[in-house]
Image (spheres, rainbow, N blue to C red):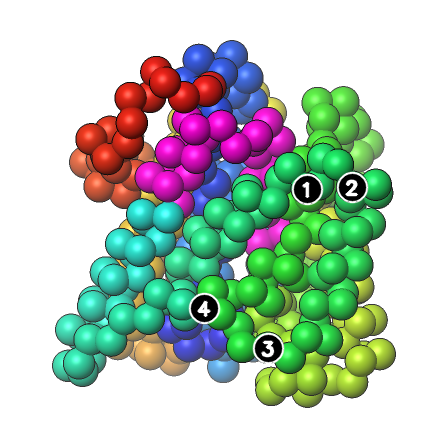
Amino acid sequence: MSTTLTQPPAAATAETTTPVERRKARDPLLDNARYWVMLLVVAGHGLQYLLDVPDARGTYAWIYAFHMPAFVLISGYVARRYEGTPKQVRTMLTSLVLPYVGLNIALDGFRALLDGKPWELNLLDPAWSTWFLIALFVWRLSSPVWRVVRAPVLVAVAVSLLSGLWQVSNVVSIHRILGLLPFYVAGMYLRPEHFAVLRRPWVRFVSLATLSGTLAWCLLRHEGWYVSWLYWRDAYADAPLEADAVGGLTTRAGLLVVGFVLSAAVLAVVPARQDRTSELGRNTMNAYVLHGFVLILLAHVGVFSALASWGALSVPVVVIGSVLLGTALMSPPVARVVGPVVTPQLRWAFRDQRAGGV
């Protein structure tokens, strides 16, 4: 994540349960949360083009403090039943690996076309919005490990903190995969009773106050911040962070705390009832895959450059536009058109599914 087109959106979560399981266990709270967080993803990627505008930078920092942690947490909860059965592996290949390859090719080609440059493809260096797909694939594969180790969340936190000391090439976004790992593992161990605690009236009130207060604080105190810390992308000692071990460990620890607190706050304040956003929240993958093309095109034709001259007014314009764009891309009509392309089934490529496990 940076101020360039190499930034991730934070994404979308693909489920590996069967259709019957999804109908039985589908929680509207999680679908609603996915919808609202996806809108923040789109808004964050729009605001990244306006970081010279103070209010845009503050809002951007607030969004990036928790939108990825929240999505990863939800992804861990959704994947808590992953056991590596043949059916689940097939689902991962068609909903994560194939979209990762296809979206990398499409985004690189689209930008090359707009910029009039030769097309170059490097699947080891995820294009803008694709890193989350490969990260989710790796986290899913690691799920059995977190069921057998003692104190899995604490172990994952230790991995996250220590990984920042590892100065290694960020192949397939390995730093993000390890840095955000605690949220995935914690999500695996969430249970319905934990969500019930978050729905208590006083918890919801405190959560709303926390989200509002941190937004106000970001708007007032963002000057001088290195937003690159919020990308979970770099080793502590590498540019642009250039921190010593102590500074890196303490900053990463603080971001983990902030990420968990604000993620819990989001899950507390979003509606828990079945409504229109519940249906839309089931199609976050479509918005995740498609919104980047729209934003890249708008940036190419100068829309964001023009908005920058509007100053603080540009922020609500981008936010409202992001809500409209994200909602449209998650709508059922779009799902019917792009669903088979975004997550192809490719049944012909696999053995008879009846021969595998559930």
Give the alpha-carbon distance from disc 2 to disc 4, as whole Å. 33 Å
Circle 2 packing at 10 Å, graded few (<14), some (14-19), many (20+), is: few
The quadrant holding residue 105 is bottom left
Callout 1–callout 2 Cβ contact below 8 Å: yes
**Magenta segment:** 68-96
Drawn side of residue 142 relative to residue 251, left or right: left
Asked whether the viewer can see residue 201, the reply is: no
Residue 168's label in the rendered image is 3
Residue type at the position of mark 1 = Val
Residue type at the position of mark 3 = Val
The mark that comes first in sequence, 3 or 2, is 2
Callout 3–callout 4 Cβ contact below 8 Å: no
Residue 242 image offset from top left, x and y in percent: 68, 87
Which of the two residues, 154 or 129, is positioned nearer the viewer here?
154
Give the alpha-carbon distance from disc 4 to disc 1, as whole Å. 29 Å
Residue type at the position of mark 4 = Gln
Which of the two residues, 138 or 22, is positioned nearer the viewer here?
138
Q: Which residue is mark 1?
A: 145
Relative vertical location of residue 53 with respect to residue 146 in this rendering, above or below = below
